[in-house]
């Protein structure tokens, strides 16, 4: 039981070093730039940074809301706060 973000980061580009993996310069996106999304099994590059084990108390339904939806909103709020 794991969750994978929509944007897979490389960990070594300028943006990743600046702790901004969602704008990784070498990003990959399962189901878009590589096979993935609806496959039963899929290879995730750099799994040590791009795969998170789900705690037993988090359901798949709850985990589905964490990926792109949460990180997009979180980043928007942080950027807006920084601009004020």
Image: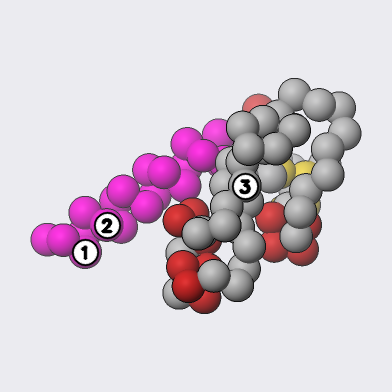
Mark positioned earlier in the residue sequence (3 or 1): 3
- How many numbered discs? 3
Please tell me in which quadrant of the rendered image residue 62 appears.
top right
The span picked out in magenta is 65-84
Outermost left residue: 84
What kind of secondary structure does the magenta stretch mostly adopt?
helix
Q: Report how far apart the C-alphas of labels 3 and 1 lie in the structure.
A: 27 Å
In the image, residue 29 lies at what x, y percent?
61, 41
Label of residue 79 in the image:
2
For image coordinates 29% across by 51% down, the residue present is 77
Q: Name the residue under label 3.
A: 28
**Residue depth check, mark 2 versus mark 3: number of the one nearer the observer:** 3
Query: Residue drawn 69% across and 45% down?
Result: 4
Query: Callout 1: 10 Å neighbours few (<14), some, many (20+)?
Result: few
Q: Name the residue under label 1.
A: 82
Compared with residue 79, is residue 63 higher up or lower down, i.e. above or below?
above
Quarter containing the C terminus: bottom left
Is residue 50 toward the left or the right of residue 69 in the image? right
Q: Is residue 49 left or right of residue 66?
A: right
- Cα–Cα gap, marks 2 and 3: 23 Å
Residue farthest to the top, as pictured: 38
Q: Position of residue 81 (x, y in %)?
A: 21, 59
**Viewer-proximal residue among 66 and 83:** 83
Q: In this view, does 51 lie above or below 1?
A: below
Could you tell which of marks 2 and 3 lies nearer the N-terminus? 3
| Residues under numbered marks 1 and 2 in contact, where contact means CB atoms less than 8 Å apart | yes
């Amino acid at each position: 039981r794991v969750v994978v973000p929509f944007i897979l980061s490389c960990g070594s580009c300028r943006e990743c070093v600046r702790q901004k993996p969602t704008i990784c310069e070498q990003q990959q996106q399962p189901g878009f730039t590589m096979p993935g999304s609806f496959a039963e099994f899929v290879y995730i590059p750099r799994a040590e940074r791009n795969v998170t084990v789900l705690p037993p108390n988090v359901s798949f339904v709850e985990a589905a809301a964490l990926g792109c939806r949460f990180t997009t909103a979180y980043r928007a709020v942080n950027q807006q706060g920084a601009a004020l």
